[in-house]
Image (cartoon, helix red, strand yellow):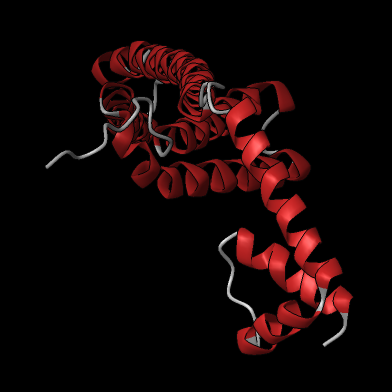
Amino acid sequence: MTCANVRSALSAMMDGEPVDRPAEVSEHLRGCDACTLWRSQAETLAAQLRDRYSDTPDLTENVLAAVADGQRQADRHQLAIRAGRRRLLRWAVGVAAVVQLCLAVPALLTAAGVTEVTAIHTSREMASFDIAVAVGFLLAAVRPERAKAFVPVAAVLAVCLGATSLLDVSAGFTGLVDEAGHMVALVQAGLLWALGRVSDIPTTTSRPVTT
């Protein structure tokens, strides 16, 4: 073995690492004064370094604790933002449902502005449908974890109302102003979808399980 190989092996051995052919390293040292001196000087230097830095405190735990604390604070901040967003969406969905109820209940009871018997019946059926949808929205506002289940119903309702409104307006059966109210269904569907997404995200930090 060359002196370079032996000194590399000696350095590894002082670090507690395994080396190849340790017997050949020992054999080389018995016949090489230069490598023997190098080992002695390296061991002396390592001992001096250990003595010099023996009183240096180990800050590993403190650093890791500080990093973990910073991460917890960032998580709490993000959770507060998500909780505020969900609260706002719950209020928006609830207000939209209450408005829809306020408009549908009078139509169900009086069918105001409608004179024909068939039209009165149709108006009351539509009012009943609107009340049922409004109740679903109120339930989603109260129990936001269930909002996602109502999204398909709200989306289909918004698409169907939008498509039929376009057809009726283009055919001249009704005016664009009269159908503008159906945009509320589209807004409600969007609010419900957003509430369902926010409700999928945890708003509290989970605690580690201890045994």
184 or 58, nearer to the observer: 58
Instruction: Give the quarter of the figure containing the C terminus.
Output: top left
Q: Quadrant of residue 83?
A: top left
In the rendered view, does 166 fall on the left or right side of 99? right
In the rendered image of this protein, does residue 122 appear above or below residue 92? Answer: below
Q: Is residue 178 left or right of residue 121?
A: right
Residue in the foreground of this view, choosing between 151 and 196: 196
User: Residue at 69% of width from left, 45% of height from top?
Assistant: 44
Q: Nearer the viewer, residue 61 or 116?
A: 61
Q: Which residue is located at x 46 percent, y 23 percent?
A: 65
**Which quadrant holds residue 184?**
top right
* Residue at 37 percent of width and 42 percent of height: 150
Query: Residue 197's spot in the image, x, y percent?
Result: 48, 38
Is residue 35 depicted above or below 152 in this figure? below
- Residue 188 in picture, x, y percent from top left: 50, 28
Q: Quadrant of residue 125?
A: top left
Count of all numbered marks drawn on residues in the image: 0
In the image, is residue 165 above or below residue 204? below
Quadrant containing the N terminus is bottom right
Residue 108 is situated, as x and y percent measured from the top left of the image, at 28, 21
Return the residue found at the far left.
211
| Percent position of residue 206, x then y | 30, 33
Residue at image coords 47%, 19%: 69
